[in-house]
Amino acid sequence: MKTLVVGIDAACSRVLDPLIEAEAVPRIEKLLETGASAPLESQIPPWTASAWPSIYTGMNPGTHGVFDFLTFSGYDWDVINATHVRAPAIWEILDTHGLSSVVLNVPVTDPPAAIDGAIVPGYLAPEAPTGHPEGVVEELRAELGEYRIYPPHGHDADRGTVISNYRDLVDSRGRAFRYLFRQLGPDFGFLEFQATDSVVHELGGDLDAIETIYRAVDREIDAVLESCDPDTVFLVSDHGIGPYEAYSFHVNEFLKNRGYVERVFGRAGGMPSWGTIHERARVADSKSVRVGRALSRATLVGARAGLTSQRMYRILDRVGLAETVIGLVPSEAIRSATEQVDFERSVAYMRSRTELGVRINLAGRDPEGRVSPDEYETVRKELIEALSDVRTPDGDRVFEAVLPREAVFSGPYLDDSADIVTIPHEFEQFLSTRLGEEFGEPEEPWNHKREGIVAASGAGIDTEASLSGATLFDVAPTVLASLGVPHDDRMDGAVLPVARSVGTTRYSGGETPRPTESATVEERLLQLGYLDR
């Protein structure tokens, strides 16, 4: 293999430094010590679904087209897939130069491109993806005994099961990649480990769990390097991760209190703000269905009087009864008693917290637009000023910056982004789309940070060169340079000093986006806290 990229989701010095000190990740430590390495600045937003496409295309979301886990059409939404990435990936570019690739578990690669080699999709693919060539996933399952994209456990799994399942996933990634290498002998490889991020979302700052998964990842990296013997190795992450010790800021509640958001109760459709508590409610028989309908009517009356399910939960939680009551209350009652953002009647709202932005309900663009094009800039300026001034109960700034979208993104798909981009101060404030009190405790104890990591070593790499200032967008042009291939002139990044550029050109790529039809994907996003439902 000429060049191998190893992706470790959420890897950063905050996580790796104590693991290196504990001698838990010797192979990763060796890659960092023998090559050039540095922090890698992620993008806005620094979340998997948009950041990995930025890594493998070298372009910002405004150019490749993916801003979030979700894509929006009017007030409807869908989970994104590879057809929403409308720019050529590294492996597609290499294919035009006659170089083969094996790409395994990289997020947002389903449906896969037809290239010389193999693509086994990763995160956001359905559990039974197509893969390329057709039948490759079934071949892996026949060879390995099992190959899963997601762990088999649900949201209520115990700690030991969660760790064991993620360790199995890590093991299968390494074994599958080595098998495909032996079968195909590719020029280029891209292997990604997602479990390093997912286990944190499920178990928070459980340092022992994190160490267990990283030890497994380190073993698989070691085995892959021994088996594939690549000339050049890149180690990259899409973002960092760490504790959120400040507040959860409920953006839509802030906007509601200032007249921008209208609310509705108990209506199906759109993206509700029920909270994850509805998942735990079950209606078991016909009698409980009737009870549920009665409770639904009663709680809807209470909701209109201000006693919503979110407030009920907080009250019950203070006296230690929340979990008990949730197990008895039908989901219909919880849904009907919960405030939702009424997108059609609102002036502006946050649609998805991981989009890091506020959308304006614009007439002529949105089906029931409330803001005329003549008012757009005035309303946007008002919102930017209001959000910029927000302080926590401790007096700290909530946002590092609140900007018009064109100050953050550029490219042909700029109009698909939120109108206003909200960047949390040092990523210590947890943003939420839920209605309720404006401030609360962070809904997750650990979450994404802006700074990841990058390392490069091997043939053609100047290990004495500095990687200071490296960004997510620099990865693709540098990887292509290591293979003697010019990069796309639309890439926002540049070849890092560790490699020698061979110039630029223009490549074609992208297709018409197609819907994602998989309940499995939505359930995983819910389980990891990416959707506020």
Image (cartoon, grey):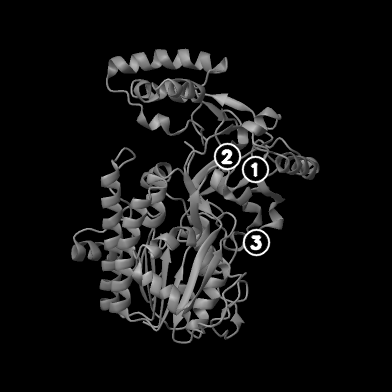
The residue lying toward the viewer, choosing from 382 and 229, is 229
* Snapshot quadrant of residue 264: top right
As drawn, the label of residue 478 is: none
Kind of residue indicated by mark 1:
Val
- Residue 517: percent from the left, percent from the top? 40, 48
Residue identifier under label 3: 412
Q: Is residue 293 above or below residue 129?
A: above
What's under tag 3, amino acid-wise? Answer: Pro
Q: Name the residue under label 1.
A: 398
Q: Position of residue 427 (x, y in %)?
A: 58, 49
Q: How crowded is mark 3: few (under 14 residues within 10 Å), some or many (20 or more)?
A: few
> In the drawing, does residue 521 fall left or right of residue 353?
left
Q: Give the residue drawn at x 61%, y 51%.
A: 426
Q: Which amino acid does label 2 sit on?
A: Tyr
Residue placed furthest toward the front = 21
N-terminal of the pair, mark 2 or mark 1, is 2
In which quadrant will I find the N terminus? bottom left
Distance from label 3 to label 2 (Cα)? 21 Å
Up-down: is 318 above or below 458? above
Nearer mark to the viewer, of 3 and 1 = 1
Query: Dot 2: within a 10 Å radius of its alpha carbon, few (fewer than 14), some, or many (20 or more) residues?
Result: some
- Name the residue located 28 percent from the left edge and 78 percent from the top edge: 227
Give the structural element (helix, strand or loop) at label 2: loop
Judging by the rendered image, the residue that carries numbered circle 2 is 75
The image position of residue 500, as x and y in percent, is: 56, 85
Cα distance in 3D space between marks 3 and 1: 30 Å
Q: In the rendered structure, which disc, 3 or 1, sits on the residue that comes first in sequence?
A: 1
Q: In this view of the protein, can residue 287 be seen by the observer?
A: yes
CB within 8 Å, label 3 to label 2 = no
